[in-house]
Image: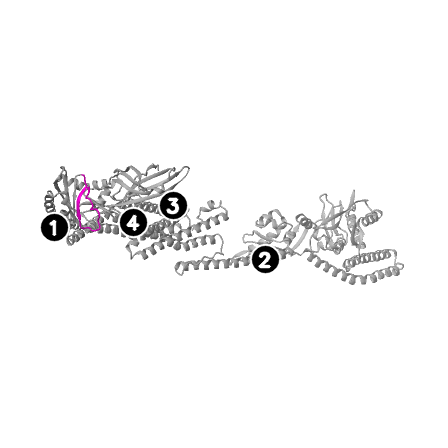
Amino acid sequence: MVNSLETPSTNARSFWRCSLLVALIWLVATCRAVAADLPVIDEGAPFDVRSAFVEPRDHVYLLSATLEVALSRAAQQALTNGVPVLLQLEFKVVRKRGWLPDVDVGSLTQRWHLSYDALTEHYLIKNESTGLQYSHESLAAALADLGSVQGLPVIDEALIQKGRRYEALLRLTASIEGGVPSALKYMMFWIDWRRSTEWYTWTLRP
Amino acid sequence: MDAPPMNAPHAVARSTPVSRARRGRWRASVMALLVLLGVVASSASLLILTGAAQDAHKLRTLQPWLLAGNLLAVMVLLLLISRKLYALVRDYRAHAPGSRLKARTVQMFSLLALAPILVTYFFSVNAINRGIDSWFDSKVSTGLEDALALSRAALSLRMREFGAHTTALASDLHSVSDYEMMSQLDRYRRIAGASELIVVSDGGRIIAASTDFASATLPALPAPEVLLQARQRQGYVSLDPAPGGGYRVIAAMPVGNGGNGETRLLVASYPVPEQLAGLADGVRAAYAQYGQHVYQRPYLKSTFTLTLTIVLLLSALGAVYGAFFWATRLVKPVQDLIEGTRAVGQGDLDLKLALPSNDELGYLVGSFNDMTKRLARARSDAEANRAAVEQERARLAVILARLSTGVISVDADFNLRTANQAASNILGVDLEAAVGSPLSTLADSEPSVAQFVSACSQHLAAGDRDWREPVPLITEHGRRELMVASTTLPADDGASAGLVIVFDDISTLLQAQRDAAWGEVARRLAHEIKNPLTPIQLSADRMRRRLLSQLDAKDAEILERGTHTIVQQVEAMRQMVNAFSEYARAPSLDLVPIDINQLVSEVTDLYRSHGSAVSSATPVSVRLELDPEAGMVLADRGRLRQVLNNLLTNAFEALEGQADAVVSIETHDVAIDGHSLVELVVVDNGPGFQSVTGGQMFDPYVTSKPKGTGLGLAIVKKIIDEHGGSIEAENTPEGGARVRALLPRDEAARGIFSMTGSRDLRRSEFRREHV
């Protein structure tokens, strides 16, 4: 009687244990298969806003900034494989109001596509808003060109009023999103497809 | 699903039915919500997929939603399955009915469904990975690179030409002054076929430029590193992507020293022939796309693997959930049957199981329902039968209790099974208390029962099945006649199941018969004997008167003595006949309320004064113990007086010649069965009744005295019986005789001795004790 009661119960227990083991092995294998050797953008290459300032000229504030832009191995690989790297410079001015939340006064976003031409072995920089394209023989030259922003008109002087406190913020973002199917980006939520610098801030005194 | 398992009631018993019901409702609604969510998620995924399948771009934008929907469906399925699994494990541990079958079915279904799904999954993942790898064949890659190199080689030929042109132009320009520079440049540009010619100073300043772009106001300067290279290497030629598409060749050559020793550069831009540029661009584009695909390869693999995994998860979880669903549906009727069997085992036959389907299980459930229905009908029939039998028994018991006939039944081993009240009364034993014990033990304790039992045993030993015979019962109170009839009870197997013994106390009946016979005898005697007595007496008288004077003295004396004897004997005979006629006289009572004590006093006074008339030899002292409570009794004064006369005469006659003769007369107030009676006791200290037992004492011509008619006590008994009373006679332990008579005080009490007919005092007392 005891045996006949115990045998099926033992069987069932071993069955569920086996099932659990198989499920675990399968889960580990799948994770390994999915995450195998995927390039990542963030690899510790220097990526920062070194300095930035604005100065008014002809009723417009012009931005000058020095950016340190280096691409990770993964990003470089993507670039040489023909995947464009998108660089995005975000600038905005907020009015500080003490305890109250800040007010956005104005903002500007500048985008560049950095691509590689395999035939000419040149790196091309194309400004998305102006459509102007520059080519460089080396990646270093291209990045140096990108890193030096000179006299970029960012905000109308009329928006900045005297006697008030303003803050300017600048940030650079690099991403290789263009080369990856969007579904994958959602699925592999743990992978960083983009990399941003911290917001570089300085006080703007009209 | 939450059917309480075998051990569960202890746990469940703590929660109230209301809270249980509320929890059940809540669970049900959560379940319904989950299922709805799962269905909506799956359907939405399918809909999106169907709608977007044609448009790849749309599919790409919708893919996140698809993914989210599928993941949601997976989550919902996981939740549902874990809930089912938890319930199954709980039921299994609690040994709930059907849980083992369910576990086995789920296991089997899951294995059957999961095995092909897993095999397909692993093969698909492998095949897709291999398929993707096969796209990126190394030959393709090499071919593309070769094509690119070929394009580059074709273009480099042009580059060298343009370089040579530019060098020539630069050397020509060396001698041209700044003033003529512009016009010379235009000319050179047209000759060389360049699209742009610029002369740049050391500091990167444009000294002169010529361009064929009408729109361009300012020629675009080449990048600083180009100028630097050109100066350092004494020339620079490069293929450059044109801003408007296509290619151009840029050549920068030193012009020579300017006036102030600076190194000027001639930067020339040449358009690549359109056909060549188109071809090269095609190769470049193909190479770039291939490179992008190579870059995307791991992502593609991951995407497919992930998609397949989600599909696998959905299918596998769906299959497992389906296994649970079907197992539940399969096992449900079995569980119902188990619970139904248990309920039937506990006596609940009103159960009706729902028919699950038209298959064998349905047939089984139908048979079960049929069985319970039949069982219920059989049980109700049995109940009805039992009730009918019970009712019949009750009726029989009432009849038996009211019967004056004693009825007992014994089983084959002679153990008493039933006895009615009358049986107890007749035998003078509480038979109802002795039900279940053998009659022999009862016989040991009660002599009257012993006689009865021995009479029955004789027949039983002889093998008589049905018999009827009178059985005399000698008790210490006298002889009683029982008419006993016995019948064997039939048993199922034909053997004897016992006996029914019916008996009646026919002492009274016999007595009545005897009385009637004696009455008849007396009447005839009175009639036949009395008539000739007077002529005999007269004849004797005449003979004496006529012949006495004529005879001599001797004869006269003989005659005198003879006639005297005749006359005396005739007188005695007349008295006897009168007594007989008195005995045989038809009863006609004149009942009036009489003070019994007063009557007793009157009669005894008579005896005190005339005591010597009856018994001249010795004085008899009469002692009266009259109970003042005795009071009035409904009786015929004359008859009652006769009773007292007869009893006292009897006593006085018995005491004749005895010293210290005492006759005591007592009256008492007695209550029997709630009826009021008067007890009259006459006790003497004479020799008592000799050898004649109590019952026959009252028969005519039964006497223990040497002289007496033997009718005294018979008449007393007759009168007492006529009054509805009872009488008994016995010897006292001291040696005298005692006669006890009970007289009903009123009409209501007159019936109490006639109910059983032959009830005597002893038995009445017995009954009184046990009421």
The amino acid at mark 4 is Ser
Indicate which disc residue B302 carries: none
Q: Of residues B770 and B163, which is closer to you in this image?
A: B163
- Residue A162, quarter of picture: top left
Query: x and y percent of residue B257 in the render?
Result: 12, 39
Label pair 2/4, CB-CB below 8 angstroms: no
The amino acid at mark 3 is Val
Query: Magenta segment: does it hold B77?
Result: no
Give the Cα separation between the discs numbered 2 and 1: 142 Å
Indicate which disc residue A2 carries: 3
* Disc 2 target residue: B391
Secondary structure, mark 3, is helix
Mark 3 vs mark 2, foreground winner is 3
Q: Of residues A100 and B347, which is closer to you in this image?
A: A100
Give the Cα separation between the discs numbered 4 and 3: 59 Å
- Residue B396, quarter of picture: bottom right
* Disc 4 target residue: A182
Residues drawn in magenta:
B203-223
Mark 4 vs mark 3, foreground winner is 4
Say which label, 4 or 3, has the lower sequence index. Answer: 3
Query: x and y percent of residue B649 in the render?
Result: 79, 50
Asked whether residue A152 is in view, the answer is: yes
Q: Residue at x 70, y 59 (%)?
A: B513
Label pair 4/3, CB-CB below 8 angstroms: no
Label pair 2/1, CB-CB below 8 angstroms: no
Q: Which chain does tag 3 point to?
A: A
The amino acid at mark 1 is Ile
Indicate which disc residue B191 carries: 1
Q: Which chain does tag 4 point to?
A: A
Mark 2 vs mark 4, foreground winner is 4
